[in-house]
């Protein structure tokens, strides 16, 4: 049994992925290059966004890759960590905001909490 469910990225794995769907692979590479190119947002900012999103999607490959790329584009360790904290707040904030759905479901189930009725 492997030590991790996440296999290391190797040149062989990359070549196999490309060989299995070459046109799609090349289109994705072009898309990725266009997305991360300097534009209205600087490359460093785009990489910091990618670091944050990678933490929300919990992709270890993206976390590692985009953290390294952010560093190469000039991001400091403090900026990277702050981006991660933004991601953490947004992920937690999603649960907080979606509590509205649970409260609505409770209200429509006919159950009212005593604290709600007092207000």
Image (cartoon, rainbow, N blue to C red):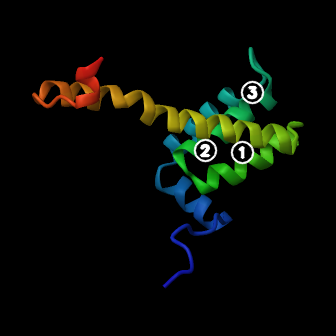
Residue 47 drawn above or below residue 58: above
Does dot 3 land on a helix, a strand or a loop? loop
Q: Does residue 66 appear to the left or right of 59 in the view shown?
A: right
Q: Residues within 10 Å of mark 2 (few under 14, many from 20)?
A: many
Disc nearest the viewer among 3 and 2:
2
Give the alpha-carbon distance from disc 3 to disc 1, as whole Å.
14 Å
Query: Label 1 near label 3: C-beta < 8 Å?
Result: no
Query: Label 1 near label 2: C-beta < 8 Å?
Result: yes
Q: Which residue position holds label 2?
A: 54
Q: Can you name the residue that lies furthest to the bottom here? A: 1
Query: Label 2 near label 3: C-beta < 8 Å?
Result: no
Disc nearest the viewer among 3 and 1:
1
Q: Can you name the residue that lies furthest to the top here? A: 40
Give the alpha-carbon distance from disc 3 to disc 2, as whole Å.
18 Å
Residue 95 drawn above or below residue 63: above
If you read the primary sequence from the N terminus, does the residue marked by circle 3 or circle 1 appear first?
3
Residue 63 drawn above or below residue 27: below
Q: Which residue position holds label 1?
A: 66
If you read the primary sequence from the N terminus, does the residue marked by circle 2 or circle 1 appear first?
2
Number of marks in the rendered image: 3
* Residue pictured at 29% horizontal, 28% vertical: 115
Residue 37 is labelled as 3
């Amino acid at each position: 049994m492997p030590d991790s469910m996440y296999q290391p990225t190797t040149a062989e794995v990359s070549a196999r992925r490309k060989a299995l769907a070459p046109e799609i692979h090349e289109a994705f590479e072009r898309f990725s290059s266009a997305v991360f190119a300097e534009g209205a947002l600087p490359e460093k900012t785009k990489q910091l966004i990618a670091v944050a999103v990678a933490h929300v999607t919990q992709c270890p490959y993206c976390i590692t890759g985009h953290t390294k790329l952010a560093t190469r584009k000039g991001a400091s360790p403090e900026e990277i960590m702050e981006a991660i904290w933004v991601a953490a707040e947004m992920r937690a904030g999603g649960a907080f905001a979606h509590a509205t759905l649970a409260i609505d479901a409770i209200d429509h189930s006919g159950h009212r909490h005593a604290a709600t009725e007092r207000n």
